[in-house]
Image (tube, grey):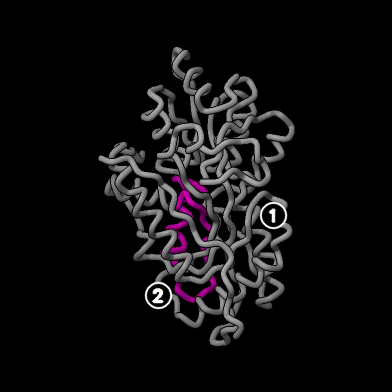
Amino acid sequence: MKRRSLLAAPVLLATPSLARAQGWQPSGPVRIVVPFPAGGTTDVLARLYAQRLTETLGVSVVVENRGGAGGSIGADVVAKAAPDGQTLLFHNLTFSTTTAALEYANRAPHSIERDFAPISLGANVPMMLLVNAQVPARNLQELVAWAKAQNPPAFYGSTGPGSTINLIGEVLKRDGGFQMEHVPFRGAAPLVQDMLAGRIAFGGDQISTALPHVRAGTLRPIATLAAQRARALPDVPTVREQGFPNAELLGWNGFFAPARTPEATLARLQTEIAAAARALAPRIQELGAEPGGNSSAEFGASVHAQVAAVRPLVRELRMQVE
């Protein structure tokens, strides 16, 4: 099967409608389900948005962390919620890879296309590949050489079976011809803690939460998955620059509602999220990310294209979901 790039870029900032959709007003608290433990980039961004939306919607907007299974547990909570705009999902690019892996294993509890209504991109956040400070590698070629010399094989970590870093780890193993044992975690925060402790040699995280550790010298970035180098770490080359184009994948975080949510509700939410993205832009950029706020149609099309690009690679690699 032809190897293909995983890049399916969500569109960045789009001009929102000037007319505020006024067909819906929440009748009570709105919860934003983050399908990972607290402390990761997705959680940090969700809390920024929740604070802003509390002010603009006039109701309490709270974040609920429901980690596990590469984000599919929290996503399933939202898929089964009432389509009334009171329960939203804030997910990231792992939604694409986990969905494809669960479908391949015939264990998918939900479908992105069937069970979710895309609302808007929250932010584009570069994904970084990282090693702990004890690993001597400073780029992917050095990582491959180091990994080939390890007996028994070293460990790499991800946020769960079928997650983005699980998929990227298997792509790198295949294309680099080396072995590493996969260790799944419930989210990026516990994965990073085990990397800092030296138990996990290699893994990945979104740049927002990786930056403090990179600046402290406790984790070393060796590649970014996006097509361009990250503005916050311009000296770190991309996977494509280092000869691994099949690992190219743009990081994103975005909002979804349950399918069958009324159009007026989605329109109001999209308008408020786009306004929040503009207001939060300086804080989002401080995290090394770029603010979103595009239309529901643009966001949905980009996510669905990414899922379509990932599916054949998951089949080729025979990704397993325990």
The spot of residue 182 in percent (x, y) is 44, 30
Residue at image point 69% right, 50% down: 287
Residue 112, relative to residue 237: is it above or below?
below
- Circle 1: residue type: Gln
User: Which residue is identified by label 1?
Assistant: 285
Numbered mark located on residue 260 in the image: 2
Mark 2 or 1: the one toward you: 1
Nearest the viewer among 23 and 308 is 308
Residue at image point 48% right, 55% down: 9
C-alpha gap between disc 2 and disc 1: 33 Å
Precedes in sequence: disc 2 or disc 1: 2
Residue at image point 43% right, 39% down: 245
Q: Residue furthest front?
A: 241
Numbered mark located on residue 315 in the image: none
Q: Is residue 94 left or right of residue 32?
A: left
Q: Is residue 291 left or right of residue 7?
A: right
Task: Report the magenta residues as a range.
Answer: 67-95
